[in-house]
Image: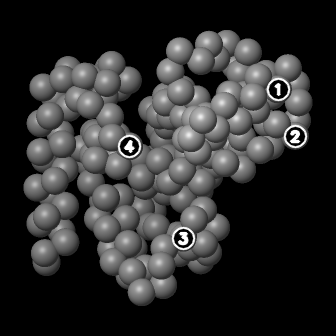
Amino acid sequence: MDAVEAAQESERVLVERAACGDHAAFEALYRTHAGWVYALCLRMCAAADVAEEATQLTFVKVWERLETYRGDSGFRPWLRRLAVNMVLSGVRQTNRRTARVFNVEDPDRYGGAAPDRLDERIDLERAIAALPDGARTVLVLHDIEGLRHDEIAELTGIATGTSKAQLHRARRLLRKRLTL
């Protein structure tokens, strides 16, 4: 068994234990995945406070639905779907008009960036945050999370062609913002 298989087996065991009510196992899952869930939510909704709330609500939903997780796909894709649905289902709507600023008070809180690249990362995060909602969502799901257009279409309820068009639009707008 190689390291990847061992990690997957360890995660499977944690999921099973957490589904049976083991709080320590759930905490381990939370600590393993909270950083990238927060990053995904932040990129999708472009507001740190909304992303924080979406992350917390995602893990509440995980706790409530963990027994329904069948394990057909990996845990991470299942968790990603819950997080994306949380953002798309209304958390973003209630705080949509808040300032679109990347919170850099504590860049190491969720993984942080290397100190010499922090300014570049902040510029990119701000440029992503300034994208229109649809374009930002598709860009994050495709270019950052690695989903295919058909998966994005299914997840967000848009046509595959719309996903492709939104990605093209997002990339064009990003290039324009980052070259100014």
Q: Residue at x 50, y 47 (%)?
A: 41
| Distance from Cα at disc 1 to Cα at disc 3 | 30 Å
| Distance from Cα at disc 1 to Cα at disc 2 | 9 Å
| Distance from Cα at disc 2 to Cα at disc 4 | 28 Å
Q: Residue at x 60, y 54 (%)?
A: 35
Indicate the amino acid at tag 1: Arg
Quadrant (top left, top right, bottom left, bottom right) of the C terminus = bottom left
| Helix, strand or loop for disc 1 | helix
In-front residue for pair 160/148: 148
Where is residue 83, by image quadrant?
top right
Indicate the amino acid at tag 3: Gly
Indicate the amino acid at tag 4: Glu
Mark closer to the chain start, 4 or 1 = 1
Q: Look at mark 4 in the image and give the residue it sits on.
A: 145
The reply to whether callout 4 and callout 3 are in contact (CB within 8 Å) is no
Q: Position of residue 84 (x, y in %)?
A: 47, 34
As drawn, 120 above or below 92: below
Asked whether the viewer can see residue 53, the reply is no
